[in-house]
Image (cartoon, helix red, strand yellow):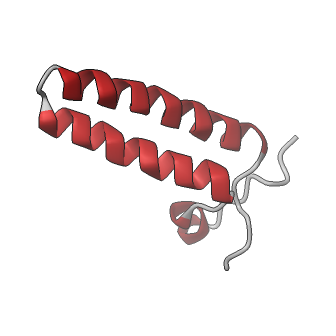
Amino acid sequence: MAESNVGGRDRLARALLATLLTIVAVNTLRKGKRKTGLLALVGALGFGFNATTCFCGLNEALGIDTTTEE
């Protein structure tokens, strides 16, 4: 597996975004807005994956490493 490149505040921000997008997805899906709900769900899954695995492919491609931030 690839090295961690997401840490500290970046990881926390991604976890919060995942939570927020999950709430948006649930609310919009309940209202019948499938496209918006599914897009929010995909975003929530992506940010959740980044926060739990401490890895982001885009960060790697751009050479960004936030694990050493304080």
In depth, the one of 15 and 7 nearer the eye is 15
Residue reaching furthest to the front = 30
Q: Position of residue 52 (x, y in %)?
A: 65, 52
Task: Decide: is 66 above or below 12.
Answer: below
Position of 51 with respect to 32 (left or right) is right
Q: How many marks?
A: 0
Q: Quadrant of the C terminus?
A: top right
Q: Position of residue 2 (x, y in %)?
A: 67, 77
Position of 19 with respect to 54 (left or right) is left
Q: Residue at x 40, y 25 (%)?
A: 23
Q: Residue at x 14, y 39 (%)?
A: 35
Q: Position of residue 49 (x, y in %)?
A: 54, 54
Task: Decide: is 67 above or below 16.
Answer: below
Position of 5 with respect to 59 (left or right) is right
Q: Quadrant of the N terminus?
A: bottom right
Q: Residue at x 24, y 34 (%)?
A: 37
Q: Residue at x 53, y 66 (%)?
A: 57
